[in-house]
Image: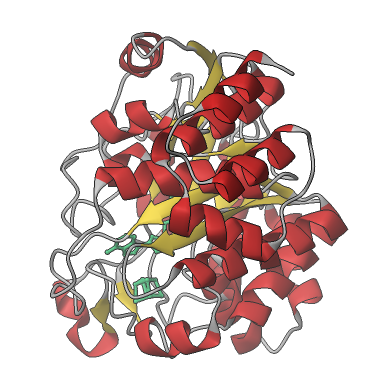
Amino acid sequence: MTEIEELITQAPAVDRHVKDICLKALNGNRLAPEEGIYLFEHGDVSVLGMTAHAIRENKHGRKVFYNRNFHIEPTNVCVFTCNFCSYSRMYKHRDEGWELSIEQMLGKVKEYDGKAVTEVHIVGGVHPKMNLEFFCELLRQIKQHRPDLHIKAFTAVELDYMIRKAGLNYHQGLLKLKDAGLDSLPGGGAEIFDEQIRKEICADKCNADEWLAIHQTAHELGMHSNATMLYGHIESYTHRIDHMERLRKLQDKTGGFNTFIPLKFRNQNNAMSHLPEVTMIEDVKNYAVSRIYLDNFGHIKTYWPMIGKATAQVSLSYGVDDLDGTIDDSTKIYSMAGSEEQNPAMSSAEIKELISSAGFEPVERDTLYKEV
Ligand code: V47
Ligand code: SF4
């Protein structure tokens, strides 16, 4: 028995079945959905943390990954009406929002000339006038200017809309974008896959099957992608495990997901502001169960601009091994939703200090987790 297994076995006042499930996971066995739900419902946060931490140590030792990246948000005008969104402006109020031209976006890329960034993350609202051709041209111009920059762009929601509007199927649309320079897909738009919850929080955008089909198609075309889960609103633990289960199944098929990113619902300036935000204990429990349940995901990421630097640092002891990137104050999604990080930017030195002062080893990576 390893030291950690002994500690868990001997932990006083911990539910017997929780211990058994944690030991099962530590022995490399996959958990069934009802075991994942049981951990959420009855798991003591310290035992879940120990288990998740041991699993992440087996995979990555003391390494915590980060990259040097910046965001471009082409527009916050959006045809959809997700109730949790604090960021978008409807098309009829588009004068209150922003829409960037290709020249303006290329200008943002040029601001990083000579700087050691490795990734641009492009994601925004779904603007009815920004179509597939527009985005292919944007990708081409960025690649022409800076071929070494990895372009991680467009949530499945944006992709579903632009590809349908172009009259193509997912394979044809994604191939066009890939040929124009798209390297990988970010994980947004997944929210919670359960159909009933989706109806209540984001009724009009692409559904779970479409989100999964887009990611599967991207993987089949040789592109990697990320997966998110928006938690801490009206969903139950059963919905969270159902969400992870669907991702785990697709990952078994394709192996194309790089990382899982739980996103905590923030309640400022949106149509769900009446809901309280969950506690930090709930955040770390969620990270830990994600690490334990998603046995076929290499990485669990905390997105510090959304959760805040302090919780991000604590999450490193609950199964998280990735801190996203330096960001350089280039995203507005979370500051508008009430995150404590109003101008998210960290230098490499700061991000490294955040990691090492928590007792871990900072490792710069590229988008595909190759060490830089
Ligand atoms: O899909 C919107 C979320 C996502 C709120 O792949 C909110 O590396 C909390 O997906 N409270 C977009 N969350 C951002 C995203 C992302 C971020 C960082 C890294 C990666 C990656 C992807 O933002 C949306 C939605 O789930 N979101 N509003 C809110 N009020
Ligand atoms: Fe539009 Fe995305 Fe906001 Fe939904 S979350 S309203 S799709 S910008």
Q: Position of residue 358 (x, y in %)?
A: 37, 14
**Colouring mode (rainbow / by chain / secondary structure / one colour):** secondary structure
Q: Is residue 167 above or below residue 355?
A: below
Quarter of the figure that contains the C terminus: top right
Depth check, front residue: 112 or 197 = 197
User: What residue sits 22% from the left and 68% below the top?
Assistant: 86
Q: Position of residue 300 (x, y in %)?
A: 56, 39
Q: Is residue 13 visible?
A: yes
Q: Is residue 12 above or below residue 64?
A: below
Depth check, front residue: 9 or 273 = 9
Q: Quadrant of residue 135?
A: bottom right
Is 129 left, or right, of 269 in this rendering? right
User: What residue sits 39% from the left and 50% below the top?
Assistant: 72
Q: Quadrant of residue 221?
A: bottom right
Depth check, front residue: 70 or 50 = 50
User: What residue sits 49% from the left and 34% below the top?
Assistant: 47
Q: Is residue 21 above or below residue 119?
A: below
User: What residue sits 55% from the left and 62% below the top?
Assistant: 37
Q: Position of residue 231 (x, y in %)?
A: 39, 62
Q: Is residue 151 visible?
A: no
Q: Name the quadrant where ligand 2 sits.
A: bottom left
Quarter of the figure that contains the N terminus: top right
Q: Position of residue 50 (x, y in %)?
A: 52, 28
Depth check, front residue: 71 or 337 = 337
Number of on-image labels: 0
Is 53 left, or right, of 314 in this rendering? right
